[in-house]
Image (spheres, grey):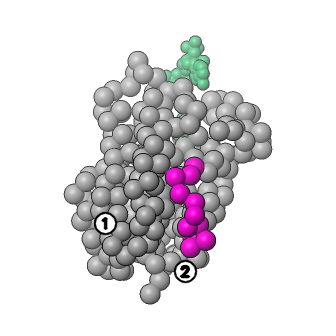
Amino acid sequence: MSRVAIVTGGTRGIGQAISLALKEMGYTVAANYAGNEEKAKAFTEATGIATFKWDVGDHQACLDGCAAVAEALGPVDIVVNNAGITRDGVLAKMSFDDWNEVMRINLGGCFNMAKATFGGMRERGWGRFVNIGSINGQAGQYGQVNYAAAKSGIHGFTKALAQEGAKFGITVNAIAPGYIDTDMVAAVPAPVLEKIVAKIPVGRLGQAHEIARGVAFFCSDEGGFVTGSTLSINGGQHMY
Ligand code: CAA
């Protein structure tokens, strides 16, 4: 039986590329999503990848959602914590809700998913977590105290859980993407984005599949000696 992988936010953007890459590796993939059911249905029709709807920021919904995946596809061996949102704004204009939603979903989602799946991986003696951080969690970003804090938290979460998982055959790693050509980055005002791209040594935005290759490596059997590591894929924008 092939290993089962859950990719949160797995039907769009970077998550979609990750779902496809893991499927190509022969894994059975469950793509989690929180939004539009019609679009998720179209994704399944186009790719053959099953989709499951829940909010990763909701603890009970994660427990129930992961149980539904295990029931439908088998025990969960791999979790890619990719789901994330932005609520950008300078501190003076940022509401508590803007802060809290980003923390709840981007960082809380990692905790919720781990609570739902870590125990089973430990019992079976094999597991993979890949947490999608960000260059902005490493370097900070004007207008993103919420997002930078949540993503920075993901890097700490990764190193702590890696220490707990190591003796059970569970690796926990992070990827810190730079600016990738997705809807999230397209929402940055054009003049601001132009200035950001001008600072990327490679001279362009990244592509979602370039992040997915890194995730695929971390999720492979060959990646078993790599844990607590962060792979920066950012075109040289921040050398960490
Ligand atoms: N450094 C210093 N000053 C900056 C700055 C920066 N990086 N960016 C903007 N400013 C300054 C402006 O020059 C301006 O100064 P003055 O008032 O003196 O003229 C002031 O800040 C206000 O700028 P805006 O007009 O842009 O203010 P705003 O309130 O309309 O918008 C903002 C603020 C929402 C933060 C907007 O600048 C923005 O969207 N910035 C981009 C944030 C960003 O990079 N988000 C990443 C999203 S993608 C992602 O997060 C994925 C990932 O992991 C990489």
When the figure is inspected, residue 71 is found, relative to residue 184, above or below; the finding is below
Can residue 109 be seen at all in this image of the molecule?
yes
Label 2: which secondary element: loop
* Amino acid of disc 2: Gly
Q: CA distance from mark 1 to mark 2?
A: 24 Å
Magenta part of the chain: 220-230
Residue at point 35% right, 80% down?
74
Percent coordinates x, y for residue 110 in the rendering:
38, 52
Residue lying farthest to the bottom in this orientation? 1
Label 1: which secondary element: helix
When the figure is inspected, residue 205 is found, relative to residue 19, above or below; the finding is above
When the figure is inspected, residue 214 is found, relative to residue 150, above or below; the finding is below
Residue at point 32% right, 43% down?
104
Can residue 180 be seen at all in this image of the molecule?
no
Front residue of this view, candidates 32 and 153: 153
Residue tagged 2 = 26
Residue lying farthest to the top in this orientation? 92
Q: Earlier in the sequence, mark 1 or mark 2?
A: 2
User: Is residue 204 toward the left or the right of residue 33 in the image?
Assistant: right
Residue lying farthest to the front in this orientation? 167
Which quadrant would residue 41 be assigned to in this image? bottom left
Which image quadrant: the N terminus?
Answer: bottom left
Number of numbered callouts drawn: 2
* Amino acid of disc 1: Gly
Residue tagged 1 = 119
- How crowded pointer 1 is (Cα within 10 Å; few <14, some 14-19, many 20+) is rated as few
